[in-house]
Amino acid sequence: MNAFSRRGACPALSAPMQTGDGLLVRLNPVAGGPSSGGPSSGGPSSGGPSSGGLSPKLLIALAESASRHGNGIMEVTARGSLQIRGLTTESAALLATEVDALGIAVRTGLPVETGPLAGIDPHEIADPRPMAERITAAIEGAGLAPRLGPKVSVVVDGGGQLTLDAVTADVRLKAVGVSAGTLWAISVAGDSQSEKRLATADEDAARDIAVAALRMVAEKGRDAHTRDLSERQLASLAGWHSTPPPSVLPEIGGTEEGAVEHSCLPVGLFDLNNGHAFGIGLPYGSMPADKIIGLAQSSLALGTSEIRLAPGRALLFLGQPANANQSLHHTAATLGFVTSPTDPRTRIAACPGAPACASGRIATRDIAEAIATENADILDFTLHVSGCAKGCANPGPAALTIVGGENGAGLVVNATAKALPAGYRPGYDAARGFSRVAAMIRGARYQGETAAACLTRLGTAGLAQTYLQE
């Protein structure tokens, strides 16, 4: 196995990964080049780790470089990283040279991630960037980064309109508003649904607990994550400098001040301390570079000063006058981007699949597009279309998963892509099989019942039998 095909590594600019359509590189911009100046409300240079902002001109130049050196397909991942596909060994080196020439600094080392609106969201409980800076400095001071694996990560979430609840992390710190100020809830090993909660602590103790957890991971080797820590180690972290959970602290209201109850898709209009951000999604996280260029050119003409990558496979446009957002919306919709949080494509997680990925057994994007077009009315649950059992686009369980395998396109109910499918049909015919399931839901659903609830009631055996029908 060559260096480019090593799994478990992050396909960074300096270490591309082999896929079915060539090499893939991943960029995490931490600061734009000389012409990137962010909005006055707080752009990339306003303190703390950057939110990955680029000027429209820089995004255009980057997309043009992707077209020259790759296959012209660009992606924004679930974590808000930018990916460029279809490179060769030679063209990847040329791309790296051009990125350097553009002055785009990309993140290296252990990622300590903050949200795309960090520091400029009026609904935040706390600006997470100073805490992220302190953790980064502590990691560097302890020499931990070289001892940790490439997929170990830390999330520092200030709350607000676009939380990082859906982003998995080895260590997560989330701001908790209390009458006396701000505390930080610390958890490990997962997203907000699957994580193991450790403690709630003040800023200093939260930093110390986070770094202590990473020390424990480093001691286990570069293949380790916080999920590998023992119960004894977790108990040690939980009891270190922590305070009682917020629910039993005195003088705390029923709802965290400034908190938004649930994270939402980064699509639509979001308040900022000064102005608004307009979020536009990439369908299934992927778009041809020429369409990204077209959208960025339109935003430049409309006065956008900064474009940020957002977890949830979207771009956030900042700095344009409020009356420009409708024009930007129209251009994005015309080009095929996701412009509404109710777009059925937002309910489908689909990896590149065949032929883009060497592991893909089915044409996931074609299947997803057919399902979104024909069955938008019943998609109130997450559908995962996975090229193989690795389940890269949605590692957790989904209500329904169509997964590629040796026997075709399998149907998995309420589990991950790694689970044994209840049945298979040919990959080219998977969308038709799903349409039969959709018709079953329409016929069986009670008045007022969600499709998700109906799926649960119908059960695996009945759904599989319907999916397999010719």
Image (tube, grey):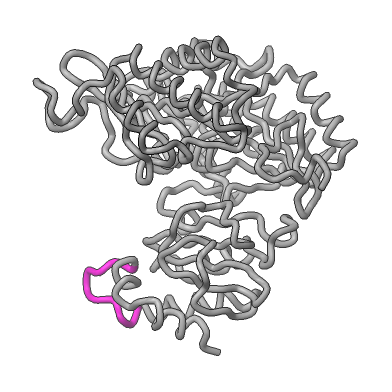
Give how far across and how far down residue 15 sits, in percent. 76, 33
Say which residue appears at 52% left-offset and 31% top-offset: 153
Compared to residue 268, the image places residue 470 above or below, namely: below
Give how far across and how far down residue 84 sits, in percent. 72, 40
* Left or right of 329 in this view: 448: left
Give how far across and how far down residue 188 sits, in percent. 40, 34
* Left or right of 334 in this view: 88: right
**In the foreground, 95 or 3:** 3
On whether residue 6 falls in the magenta region, the answer is: no
Compared to residue 265, the image places residue 452 above or below, namely: below
Say which residue appears at 79% left-offset and 52% top-offset: 21
Q: Which residues are magenta?
A: 442-451
Residue farthest toward the front in the current orientation of the protein: 232
**In the foreground, 354 or 197:** 197
Q: Quadrant of the C terminus?
A: bottom right
Say which residue appears at 58% left-offset and 42% top-offset: 77
Compared to residue 111, the image places residue 138 above or below, namely: above
Compared to residue 159, the image places residue 448 above or below, namely: below
On whether residue 446 falls in the magenta region, the answer is: yes
Q: Quadrant of residue 389?
A: bottom right
Residue farthest toward the bottom in the current orientation of the protein: 470
Residue 293 visible, this angle: no
